[in-house]
Image (cartoon, rainbow, N blue to C red):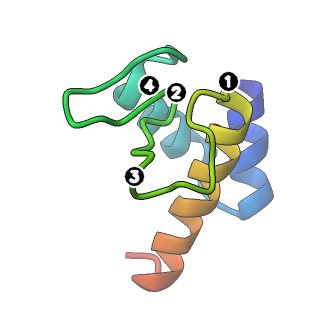
Amino acid sequence: MAYAIEQAHNVGIDSTIFCRLIDVESGWQTDVVSPAGAVGIAQIEPKWHPAVDPTDPWASLRYAAGLIRNYLDEYNGN
């Protein structure tokens, strides 16, 4: 969880919300695969995000934090 908090802080998003998101998405399990094909701790769909290895929890958390930051920027923080 400390690494998730660090990554949230690095991109300027609320670490509590980010950690809750990870908890809901995967329960902090690194080997989870959803029926929709989302993989890993951050439940990233490889076909939509080929730039990241979703089985690597460090890369996955880093990428997910950046993705949330991008969504917040795109939608003006709403």
Q: Disc 2 designates what residue? A: 41
User: How busy is the neighbourhood of tag 4: few (under 14 within 10 Å), some, or many (20 plus)?
Assistant: some
Q: Position of residue 73 (x, y in %)?
A: 53, 81
Calculate the distance from the C-alpha at mark 3 to the C-alpha at mark 2: 16 Å
Q: Disc 4 designates what residue? A: 23
Calculate the distance from the C-alpha at mark 2 to the C-alpha at mark 4: 9 Å
Dot 4 or dot 3: first in sequence order is 4
Mark 4 secondary-structure assignment = helix
Query: 30 or 52, which lies in front?
Result: 52
Q: Disc 3 designates what residue? A: 47
User: How busy is the neighbourhood of tag 2: few (under 14 within 10 Å), some, or many (20 plus)?
Assistant: many
Q: Disc 1 designates what residue? A: 1
Front disc: 3 or 2: 3
Dot 2 or dot 4: first in sequence order is 4
Dot 3 or dot 2: first in sequence order is 2
Mark 1 secondary-structure assignment = loop
Dot 1 or dot 2: first in sequence order is 1
